[in-house]
Structures are given as structure tokens and as C-alpha cells.
Amino acid sequence: ADKIMVVRDDRFRLVDGYNMEISEVMPQDAGDYVCQIGGGENRDQIHTVEILVPPTIRTSPSSGQLTARKGGSITMECRASGNPVPTIVWTRKDNVLPNGEKSYDGYAITLDKVDRHQAGVYQCTASNGVGEPVTVDMQLDVLYPPEIDVERGWVHTGEGYEAQLACIVYGEPAPNLVWYQDSFLMDPTERRSMDTRGNKHTLTIRNVQTSDFGNYSCLAENSLGKAKKYMELSGRPSPAEFRSMPYSRSKDSYNLTWVVESYPPLEEVRLLYRKIMMNESYHHPGKWHDFAIQPTNGASFSRIMSYNIRGLDSSSVYEAIVQAKNRYGWNEVSELYQFYTRRPGQDTSYGDYPEHNPSDMELMAATGGAYLQHCFWTLDVFFVILIGFL
């Protein structure tokens, strides 16, 4: 009363005798302030002050660096203060969260059975509508033994050419890697070099010799374990890849086209085909027809070949395989390839993909692996015939 203010803080001052001003406001300044009016009867006037405080974040651990071993669990905590109480949202930098979601609400996030795919930067963002949201990064490193992917398990080359074998290596701590030919440790030479870019390790062999053909392996090791992957460098032709469309323009013939890569000239090509019968079984399969084809060799190592198979039945399903040989030997047999002949009188004006009549067109549903399964349709009933187990 009588213009007397009871407080010991230079931030508080009276203005014009009846107003109080607080400078450099702090959260603890919030509360009720009482103004007493003197006179015949004392009266109190109460002012409530609420301080709006932008969010601040305290992480656990405070360094923002976390390490977990593969298969373990890790919890990241992010506690925020401010007024109003901030909300906390977790995201992952340049990625989604391990559960596939873009974000997660809550002060803590727990990851179970962690692996290398969960490593990275996790971001905790706190906001309460006062000022700008605050974001803190937390780096999660996952320790795990080496894991290896190979670009190609079988690499085709020829004498005098250059070949590359590549291993993509993952691991934390970063693994060391060495190369082997068969069981012999390899060292760099004039023709052989080992390069590393990031986690890709490449063995380059220049001016390939016959002695370079064979099995190779890359061995990666760190303090948590080791891993090994094998590759083959070969002069044999690559497996044939079929390029023709599966539906024939003819009811009784089919033009089969495939490509084989071979640096030396091809010496022999074998084509086998057979008709798939609806009543065949594993013990009584359809008859294979075997043809020896004179290869055509050109300047390119990628050799495209074709063969017109005649005397086929209409409205039928066939399958074929191809194998090729050069001076280094036979390649691996190609994958089974299925093709279809048209029914008599079927219109061929729509290219290689006609609208087949399901009442008389037999279709192959699946081939290879653990079983062969044939499917065919009639106008009234759908049948599935299991014809054999491999």
C-alpha cells in the first residue's frame, strides 16, 4: 500500500505509480500477483500471470550417440519442457521408422532385435505452439558381424578381356576384406587389383588368362565375426535367355529366339522341347525332342539365335530348354521356357497376345521348384491337376 512494492528483484518496477512491469520474464515469474488498494477499506486486486515458454529438449543419453549390438534392444528418450507442455514426435532422417510408419508420438521409442537396417539418425521434435519447434538428432549405430552380397555369383569372360568380381560388404565395426582364388590368398599384381569404394570391394583382372578361370571368394572379418561368399569366373557361355514372345502366330509352328553370351565362338547348341500333356505324371512325362543346331557366330560376344519349330499341335502348351558349348565347355541349362500355339482359325491380327478362348486353351500355371502344376479351364468347371513332385 501507499506505492510500496515488497520484492527484491531489479526486474520488477512500478510504472506511473500504480502499474508493475516485469522485465526479462522467466518461467518462475508465473503466478498470482496482488495489488492492495488503501483507503477506508482495504481491497485486494489479483492478477494471474502465465508465462508461455518455448520447448526445450533433454535427451538420454545427452550425447545423442547410441550403440546397440545386433539382436539386442535399445531405447531412445527425449524429454521436453515448456509451457504449454510440448508434444514429442519421433521421425527418422531420410527414412521411415522400423515399424514402417513415418512418425511416432511419445517421449521414448524402443527398438527390439535391432539389425543394420535400423541404424541411422532418429529425430525428436518438440512443439507447443510457442516459438518454433525444436528438433534434436540421435545417432544409432548397430554393431554386427560382416554380411556380404555379391553382384554376380557367376561371371562370364574370355581370354584377353577384363573381368570384375564384386562383393558388397556390411558390418560394424567396418570389416577388413581379403580375396581368395580357390584356397590361395590373393595379392595385387600387374594384372590383378583390389579396390574399395564405400562398402563395395572389387577385384579386377586384366588380360584374363586360362589360369584365371575358377572359383573365387571374398572373406570379410571384424571383431564380431566373419563371412565368406563364393563366385565363379568362367569362359563357358552364359545360360541362354529367351527373347521371343510366348504366343505363336501359327497353330502348328513357333519361332523360338534366345541370346547367349560367349567370347569364344560357339561350337554346339542343343534345343530340347516337349508338349505338356494334361494327363502326364512325374514317371510318365511328355516326350522330349532333341535338336543339335549349327551355331551362328558373329563379331559380338552376345549371340542371338532362333529356330523355327514345326509340326506342333494347335491349341497346345510347350516348353523348351537350350544349352550351348564353346571350347571351355557346356553352359548351365537354361530355365524352362513355355510357349503356346493358336487354335485353328484364330485371328492373328492382334499381334502376339491374343484373347484366348478359355474353353479350349490349356495354360501352364506353375513349373519347376517343388512341383509341376497344370491348370485348364472348361465352360463349367475349373480343374487343377497335380501331376508330379520333383
Image: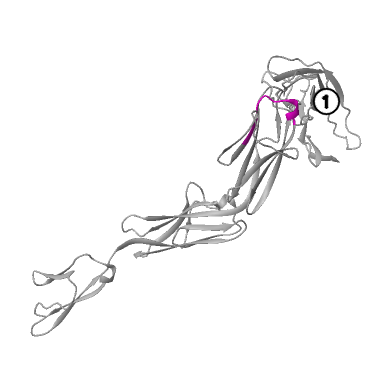
Which residue corresponds to mark 1?
273
Looking at the rendered image, the quarter that the C terminus falls into is top right
Q: Is residue 199 above or below residue 75?
A: above
Magenta stretch: residue 314 in it? no
Give residue 17's position: percent from left, percent from top.
8, 72
Amino acid carrying mark 1 in the image: Tyr
Stretch in magenta = 202-213
Q: Secondary structure at mark 1?
A: strand
Front-most of residues 49 and 178: 178
Q: Nearer the viewer, residue 309 or 100?
A: 100
In the image, 281: left or right of 205? right
Image mark count? 1
Left or right: residue 87 compared with residue 326: left
Residue at position x 64%, y 34% in the image: 188
Residue 176, position as x, y percentages in the image: 62, 45
Residue sitting nearer the eye, 133 or 374: 133
Residue 21 position, x and y percent, is 16, 68
